Amino acid sequence: MSLRAIGLVFACLLANCSEMALERPPKPGVPAGMIARTRPEKARTGQVLATIRPKQATVSARVASGHGGAVPADSARLAIARIFVAEAGWDSEPDHRAIFGVLRNIRGRGSMLEAARRASPRTTGIRGPLGPRGLWIATLIDSDLRPAGWTDRVGSWSAYVARWRSVRELAARLLAGAPIRSGCPDAIAWGMASDDRIAIRRGLVRVDCGQTLNRFWRSP
């Protein structure tokens, strides 16, 4: 399924929010909400590959069947950290904080892990991943070990391991009750600039979360 077919992915309204960024990683330095296809050496947000090599296809099948990619029942930190990377790359902390705020706002009486799974079933291993980038994101684990879906065409894992550790640590701090400081505490959805018209049609109101790659909306 292409990104264009997915359209606006609402964390509060649909069940596959995190797929928004799986095929088109955000490019740092562009205006908020703009998503662009680019290479990880430049964007530092992951690799978009045209094909899946046999080894990757084997891993993909294992993840799709529920093995290797499913988030353990006690690991909200892992689920949320994966979503951070999928939606905004490794380094956009303003996005990460705002996305955490959305998950908190939509969880209702459920847990943060349940909210993460509803928002992004592919990233959290409930459903099979989309594309090579989705594959390695769905196999990130709560350690510094290289994910099963990683490929050297993405880059050397040693260049990313510290950034993955930082993302997990931020997720852990936020889950432990650290201030979110997102600038948009009432946001209930995120998407791209091209999705404004869909947000307006659904009656949502754009909110300013600061220097983010994604756009965020709240209820009227």
Image (cartoon, rainbow, N blue to C red):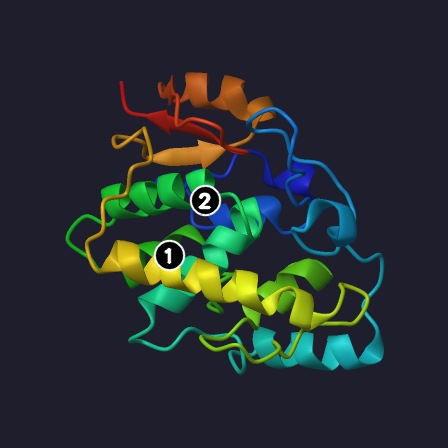
Residue 111 % position (x, y): 22, 60
Q: Residues within 10 Å of mark 2 (few under 14, many from 20)?
A: some
Q: Which circle marks residue 34 in the picture?
A: none
Instruction: Give percent across and percent down for residue 156.
Output: 74, 70
Measuring from the top left, give residue 128's x and y in whole percent: 58, 67
Q: In front: 82, or 165?
A: 165
Q: Amino acid at mark 1?
A: Leu
The reply, left or right, for residue 92 in relation to residue 118 is: right
Is residue 132 in sight in this rendering? yes
In primary-sequence order, the first of circles 1 and 2 is 2
Residue 100 lies, with reference to residue 148, above or below; the image says: above
Q: Secondary structure at mark 2?
A: helix
SS of the residue under disc 1: helix
Q: For mark 2, what is the residue?
A: 93
Residue at (75% x, 75% y) in the render: 56
Q: Residues within 10 Å of mark 1 (few under 14, many from 20)?
A: many
Visible in this render: residue 127?
Answer: no
Reply above or below: 116 against 153.
Answer: above
- Answer above or below: position of 55 versus 121: below
**Which of the 4 image quadrants contains residue 33?**
top right
- Residue placed under numbered mark 1 in the picture: 170
Residue 76 at x, y = what percent?
32, 66
Query: What residue do we see at 66% from left, 45% from top?
Result: 25
Question: In whole angstroms, how far apart are the C-alphas of marks 1 and 2?
Answer: 9 Å
Q: Amino acid at mark 2?
A: Glu
